[in-house]
Image (cartoon, rainbow, N blue to C red):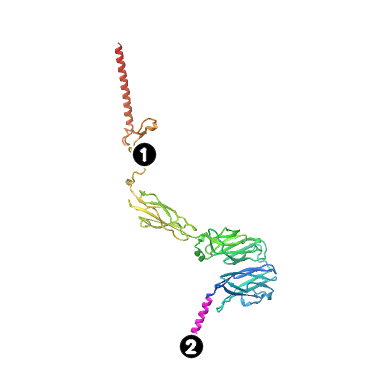
Amino acid sequence: MRKKIITTIVMIGMFLLVVANVSALTLKLEPSKLNLNGEPNTEICTKLTIDYSVPNGLVKGRDLWAEEGITDKILSLHTLNAEDLGLIVSYPESVRIIGSEDIDVCVTAPKGLYHGALLYRTMQGGSIGIELNVWITVDTETPFFVKDELKEISAFQTVLQITTNEDVAGNVIISEHEEIENSGKVLLGFLIDIDAPEVEDKLESVIIKKYYTIEQLNENSLDEDSLKLYYYNNGNWEQLGSNVNKNAKYVSATVNHFSIFGIFGNILTVPSKPVVVDDGDSTLSTTSLHAQWTSNSVGSDISEYVYAIGTSPEATNIVDWTPTTQTSVTKTGLSLNVGTTYYFSVKARNNKGWSEVGVSDGIKIITSSSSGGRGSSRRSSFSSDSTDFINLEDTGAEITGGVINLGTSEGDENNKGGGFLIMMLIILLILIALIVILSVKKSKRRDLSK
């Protein structure tokens, strides 16, 4: 009984050791299908990317082929060598992988349709190996691209929907490209290089769909709405008219050429702290308050604001946080206390999150008697607003001092202008007195002459 228990424990330990070794190894072949199309007896090539988790790890490859007419993707049905079908197949049979390696896979075939598999196995000494395969289709009897018929090709998180303006026997190669800086923009995921020399000059249109993941978005802190497809053109990145499908997570564009392509976007930051302005230092209203604000957002539009009103900065004791899409508000129906200062607080939100709180400098509720004579005019320093004035400087008179009051209070309408009449009466009396004096002097002269 004890031996059985020990044996069982040993077997479980060995099983766990195997699982641990296998889980430590990761082998990936991309793409999972290789489609080669071209002329008979002409070398047709494509690229395969091998990812291996073991640094400087060794992998070895082999190829198997199915008999003519067998199209099922079942490895046990692939029992022939390339030579059995008259094929010449070339690829690195032994590859030392440092992270990731792109290899060329080339086939020369007589006219016909051939189905095979390319297998790579890890060669880690003393460890359990992994073997993966990709399926190969070689077609040298029918054009791969038929005029005006859409052909779809996919690899490296990319789907190409290709339409040509004539029948073409050629191959489209999609491969990962090393990063090239795009000034002011951030790369999402990786670049792809699309090459098809036999096909490119026959293109009618190509729809490119480059897929991405939410993890890639978050890793780079990119705004999803800002994503655009770019292509590399003579040392410069050119933006394409792009569409973002947020549900399926891809960016698409239509082109008529092949190049290096990538998705770029803007780094997403929260909006700037709002600048909030109310209606001044004070107001007479005890029932309403008004404010407006501004905030900037880089990488994403502002989708919403919230505001609050309180008796201290950032307080919400008068009006709690209230959402709005506007940049100003007039809040009515309030019950405000005279002598109290009130503050507006505002936050802005975009796809990244909420801004800091922006606060107004406060507005105080006052009464009309405490307004301090706001709006008084120059003449109020001399008399009441209802008094009329004549500026003698305007008449050209050589009189200093400026202003003479010729009026009375607004309540005495009958006497308005009385000062002017008195002045005229005095002048008239002076004239009469002068006439009387002149008359008396003339009479005395007469008497003396007699």
Q: Mark 1 points at which residue?
A: 378
Q: State the image coordinates of residue 152 (x, y, percent, origin top left).
A: 61, 65
Q: Mark 2 points at which residue?
A: 3
State the count of labels. 2
Q: The C terminus is located in which quarter?
A: top left
Between 113 and 220, the one lying in front of the other is: 220
- Is disc 2 surrounded by few (<14), some (14 to 19) or many (20+) residues within 10 Å? few
Image height of 364 relative to 192, above or below: above
Residue stretch rendered in magenta on the structure: 1-23
- Tell which residue pokes out farthest to the top in this image: 450
Q: What element carries label 1?
A: helix
Q: State the image coordinates of residue 214 (x, y, percent, origin top left).
A: 51, 65
- Is disc 1 surrounded by few (<14), some (14 to 19) or many (20+) residues within 10 Å? few
Q: Is mark 2 on a helix, strand or loop?
A: helix
Q: Specify the amino acid type for callout 2.
A: Lys
Which of the two labelled residues, at mark 1 and mark 2, occupies the earlier sequence position? Answer: 2
